[in-house]
C-alpha cells in the first residue's frame, strides 16, 4: 500500500529520503538493468500500467524547468515564487511568472514521449488493458498529445481558482488579463510590473470579482485529496510502473515509485541521469525520453494487430 503520510508538496532533503526508505521498507538494488528486451517482456504481460511523469518529459518540448543551474525566472527559482506566501506578498510578481509560463506553453507542442504514451494508452485500451498517467507537470502537454487517463497531481497552468468564492475553472485566455499583456519577460534585468491587485485576473462569476490565483499546488500546500486518493488507487493496483523524466526530489511524488517497487512490481526509470530513487528500480534507461520511450512502448509482437 502506498503510504499516505506525505500530502504536501515539498522538496525532499536527505533526512526525508532516509525516512521514506525506512517507511517503505524497500531494498535497494545494486544496479538497475538497461535490458530493453527484458522490460518489453514485462510490458507485454502488464494489464495495469502506471506512468509517472515529471519536468524532464516536457523539457524536450522546450519547456523551461526552472530547476538546477540556470533555472531562474529573473533572479528567482520556482521555489521562491510557487508558494502561498510569495503570492500574498507580491501577487503581481507571481502572476507575471505564471503569465510568462502560460504564454510560453502556447508556443510548445507535445514531443515524441508524450505521443508515445498517448498512443500506448489508446492501443492497450482496445485490448482491455489500462494506462494511467500521473503527472507532476502543469503544462497539459499529455492532454494535448491525446492522453485521456491523466491525474495532474500539481494542477494545471490553464486553470484558475478564486480566493474569494473558491470556484475553479479552465482558463486558456491569452493574455489572461489586459494588464499582463507583454509582461513577465524572464530577463534578470527586468523590473517588476507592479500591477495593482485590482487589475490582476479576477473572478467573473456573478457577484464575486475576487482575486484569482493559478490552480496549481504550490510548495507547502496539500495535494488535492481526491487526486491523491485516485493516484494511490492506481499505484496500489498497477503491475508495471514507468517513471519518466522526474528528478524524484519533490514529494509526495518522489516516494510513489519506490513504494511500488517495494511490493515487487517492476519499475522502469527513463531519465537523462540517475536520481535518488534509481537504485530502487528494476530498470533504468538513460537518454532523452523522446528517444527511449517510443521504443519501450511500441506495439509488442504478442499484441493483436
Image (spheres, grey):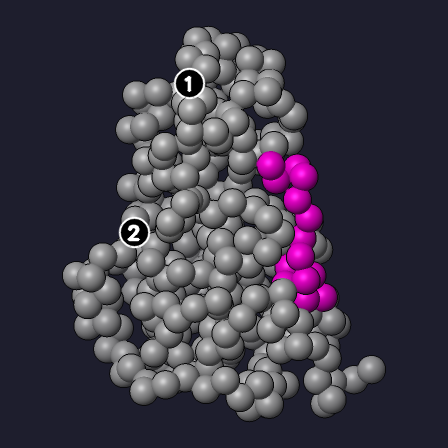
Asked if disc 2 and disc 1 are in contact, CB closer than 8 Å, the reply is no
Of residues 192 and 44, the one nearer the viewer is: 192
For the C terminus, the quadrant is bottom right
Label 2 sits on a secondary structure element that is strand
Q: Residue 198: horizontal and vertical position, in percent? A: 46, 9
Q: Residue 196: horizontal and vertical position, in percent? A: 44, 9
Query: Is the residue 191 above or below the residue 215 in the image?
Result: above
State whether residue 298 appears in this view. Answer: yes
Indicate left or right for 116 with 257 as reference: right
Picture disc at residue 11: 2
Query: Is the residue 62 above or below the residue 204 in the image?
Result: below
- Tell me how far mark 2 sits from mark 1, CA to CA: 27 Å
Q: Earlier in the sequence, mark 2 or mark 1?
A: 2
Which residue is disc 1 drawn over? 192
Query: Is the residue 229 above or below the residue 203 in the image?
Result: below
Q: Which residues are magenta?
A: 104-119
State whether residue 204 appears in this view. Answer: no
Q: Residue 85: horizontal and vertical position, in percent? A: 28, 28
Q: Residues within 10 Å of mark 1 (few under 14, many from 20)?
A: some
Residue drawn at x 32%, y 28% as measured from the top left? 86
Amino acid at each position: 500500500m502506498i503510504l499516505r503520510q506525505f500530502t504536501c508538496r515539498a522538496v525532499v532533503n536527505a533526512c526525508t529520503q532516509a525516512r521514506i526508505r525506512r517507511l517503505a521498507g524497500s531494498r535497494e538494488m545494486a544496479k538497475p538493468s538497461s535490458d530493453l528486451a527484458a522490460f518489453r517482456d514485462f510490458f507485454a504481460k502488464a494489464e495495469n500500467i502506471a506512468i509517472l511523469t515529471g519536468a524532464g518529459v516536457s523539457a524536450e518540448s522546450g519547456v523551461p524547468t526552472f530547476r538546477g543551474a540556470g533555472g531562474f525566472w529573473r533572479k528567482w527559482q520556482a521555489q521562491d515564487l510557487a508558494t502561498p506566501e510569495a503570492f500574498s506578498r507580491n501577487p503581481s510578481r507571481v502572476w507575471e511568472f505564471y503569465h510568462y509560463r502560460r504564454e510560453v506553453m502556447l508556443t510548445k507542442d507535445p514531443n515524441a514521449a508524450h505521443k508515445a504514451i498517448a498512443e500506448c494508452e489508446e492501443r492497450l485500451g482496445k485490448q482491455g488493458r489500462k494506462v494511467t498517467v500521473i503527472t507532476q507537470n502543469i503544462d497539459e502537454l499529455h492532454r494535448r498529445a491525446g492522453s485521456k487517463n491523466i491525474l495532474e497531481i500539481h494542477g494545471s497552468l490553464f486553470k484558475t481558482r478564486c480566493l474569494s468564492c473558491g470556484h475553479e475553472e479552465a482558463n486558456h485566455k491569452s493574455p489572461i488579463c489586459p494588464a499582463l499583456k507583454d509582461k513577465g519577460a524572464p530577463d534578470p534585468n527586468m523590473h517588476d510590473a507592479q500591477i495593482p491587485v485590482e487589475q490582476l485576473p479576477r473572478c467573473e462569476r456573478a457577484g464575486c470579482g475576487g482575486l484569482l490565483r493559478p490552480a496549481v499546488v504550490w510548495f507547502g500546500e496539500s495535494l488535492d485529496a481526491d487526486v491523491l486518493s485516485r493516484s494511490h488507487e492506481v499505484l496500489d493496483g498497477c503491475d508495471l510502473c514507468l517513471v519518466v523524466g522526474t528528478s524524484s526530489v519533490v514529494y509526495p511524488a518522489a516516494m510513489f515509485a519506490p513504494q511500488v517497487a517495494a511490493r515487487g512490481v517492476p519499475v522502469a526509470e527513463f531519465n537523462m541521469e540517475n536520481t535518488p530513487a534509481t537504485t530502487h528500480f528494476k530498470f533504468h534507461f538513460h537518454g532523452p525520453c523522446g528517444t527511449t520511450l517510443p521504443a519501450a512502448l511500441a506495439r509488442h509482437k504478442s499484441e493483436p494487430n
